[in-house]
Image (spheres, grey):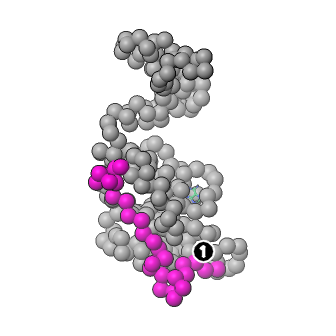
Amino acid sequence: MKISILTLFPEMFGALSCSIIGRAVNNGFLQIDIVDIRKYSKDKHFKCDDYPFGGGAGMVMMPQPIYDAVQSVDPNRKCRRIYMSPKGRVFSDSIVKEIASDSRDLLILCGHYEGVDQRVLDLCIDEEISIGDYVLTGGELAAMVVVDAVSRFVPGVLGSEKSNRDESISSGRLEYPQYTRPAEFMGVKVPEILLSGHHENVEKWRNKESERLTSLLRPDLTENEK
Ligand code: ADE
């Protein structure tokens, strides 16, 4: 999958060179292109924002640099085009899977300041996505959340496909607690069953713990099943 991210702050995306996403990019399972909107400004100072018509606080991102950046990345409208915004559909596991199973490449527009001129959104964007009911200073961190969560479902990105199925939420349950060495830490022992080598009992214990934690911490996850 190719993901193009349009932003005024390309340097923020250094985080995507790390860890699992960085490895997936290096190994060719994922292509991430960071596109600097400022390069498309026709202003001699590369200005990309201006005062809002009608007055009010803050600045609004101008339509032309964004329009030209989108056109250069996706001239034939082949991408799924997303604008990160607190007004959007609230991101969830089902949206992650919907995007990951879409055969189109992704184009993600990050806004800043007080927002983006509505006309360029109407002209260029397919959908708006919010990562939650709070307002960030820009769409960059939100875009990284979407890239990270979607990439986990791109074949080859995770070492083993199984890692996805067992994960919290994806399975409709919270994940069971995990432990590693040492078997005793600060006087606290790992549950005996995990040291037994009895795979069936380990599986049963993990399922029970998943159910217990889900009904304790997130009973809403299973409400539809009742
Ligand atoms: N930009 C600012 N706040 C946001 C949010 N909550 N989700 C997505 N993009 C945003």
Residue sitting at the far right: 56
- Seen in the picture, residue 87 relative to 113 is either above or below; the reply is above
Label 1 lies in ligand 1 vicinity (Cβ under 8 Å): no
Quadrant, the N terminus: bottom left
- Residue 205, given in percent of the width and then of the height, sits at 46, 16
- Seen in the picture, residue 171 relative to 88 is either above or below; the reply is above
- Is residue 162 toward the left or the right of residue 205 in the image? left
- Which residue is drawn at the image coordinates 51% and 75% (left, top)? 119
Comparing 203 with 90, the one in front is 203
- Residue 141, given in percent of the width and then of the height, sits at 53, 56
Ligand 1 sits in which quadrant?
bottom right
User: Is residue 167 on the magenta stretch?
Assistant: no
- Is residue 118 toward the left or the right of residue 167 in the image? right
Mark 1 nearby-residue class (10 Å; few <14, some 14–19, many ≥20): many
User: Is residue 41 on the magenta stretch?
Assistant: yes
Residue 99 appears anywhere in the view: no
Tell how many labels. 1
Residue 74 appears anywhere in the view: yes
- Seen in the picture, residue 2 relative to 46 is either above or below; the reply is above
Comparing 126 with 79, the one in front is 79
- Residue 186, given in percent of the width and then of the height, sits at 60, 21
- Residue 152, given in percent of the width and then of the height, sits at 38, 44
- Seen in the picture, residue 160 relative to 143 is either above or below; the reply is above
- Which residue is drawn at the image coordinates 48% and 55% (left, top)? 15
Comparing 1 with 196, the one in front is 196
Q: Which residue is mark 1?
A: 60
Magenta extent: 23-51
Q: Callout 1: helix, strand or loop?
A: strand
- Which residue is drawn at the image coordinates 49% and 76% (left, top)? 38
- Which residue is drawn at the image coordinates 63% and 57% (left, top)? 135
Which residue type carries mark 1? Val
